Image: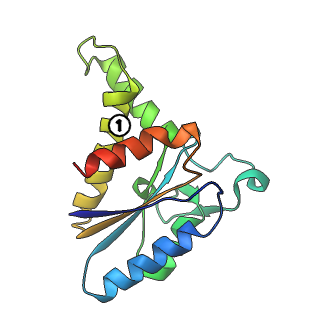
Amino acid sequence: MKYVIVTGGVLSGLGKGISTSSIGVLLKSKGLKVCPIKIDPYLNVDAGTMNPYQHGEVFVLDDGAEVDLDLGNYERFLDVNLTGDHNITTGKVYRAVIEKERRGDYLGKTVQIIPHITDEIKALLREVGEKEHADVVLVEVGGTVGDIEGMPFLEAVRQLGQ
């Protein structure tokens, strides 16, 4: 499984979602199984309760997940039905890590951004790609590269390349 990571520069909302969708169409036209994933580095678990004037329209997937509108573009461009698993937020990642810590999965270790948060991000990306039997996982990292909220995600995708 290969990964294509799409990030932006210093401005958000410059068409990363359409670019990601278009790259997916090109890869699919070559016979590759493509799995798009959108990373949203906000602390909300999903987009359902966010103000549309701040975040934009919410897209509702067939499984009821309330996600970023980019996932609607992925579905239309690639002719696929996605699930809430195709949208990873900081809130989802932190919730999963805290639940693991409470269960004792970390055996009393100090839970940290590296390795625990980054490992969770990598696991989520791999799980979705493997479940879809993807040749290529397209990962769009939302927001801007300089935002501190996105740093754990950028570190995680950097580690995927090692």
Q: Is residue 73 above or below residue 151?
A: below
Q: Secondary structure at mark 1?
A: helix
Q: Residue furthest bottom?
A: 29
x, y percent for residue 151: 48, 40
> Front-most of 112 and 90?
112
Quadrant of the image occupied by residue 147: top right
Residue sitting nearer the eye, 82 or 53: 53
- Expressed as whole percent of the image width and height from the top left, the position of residue 91 reads 51, 37
Q: Residue at x 56, y 37 (%)?
A: 148
The residue that appears at 45% across and 55% down in the rendered structure is: 84
Is 117 rendered above or below residue 61?
above
Is 22 positioned to the left or the right of 161 in the image?
Answer: right
The residue carrying mark 1 is 118
User: Relative to 97, is 5 above or below?
Assistant: below
Q: As rendered, which of 107 and 14 lies closer to the eye?
A: 14
Horizontally, residue 20 falls left or right of residue 147, namely: left
Q: Position of residue 130 (x, y in %)?
A: 22, 59
Identify the residue at the far right of this view: 53
Would residue 70 be seen by someone viewing this image from the given angle? yes
| The N terminus sits in image quarter | bottom left
Asked if residue 79 can be seen in this view, the reply is no
Residue type, label 1: Thr
Up-down: is 22 above or below 117? below
Crowdedness of circle 1 by 10 Å Cα count: few (<14), some, many (20+)? many
Name the residue rendered at 27%, 16% in the picture: 104
Q: Quadrant of residue 79?
A: bottom left
Residue 60: x %, y % from top left: 57, 62
The quarter of the displayed image where residue 31 is located: bottom left
Q: How many marks?
A: 1
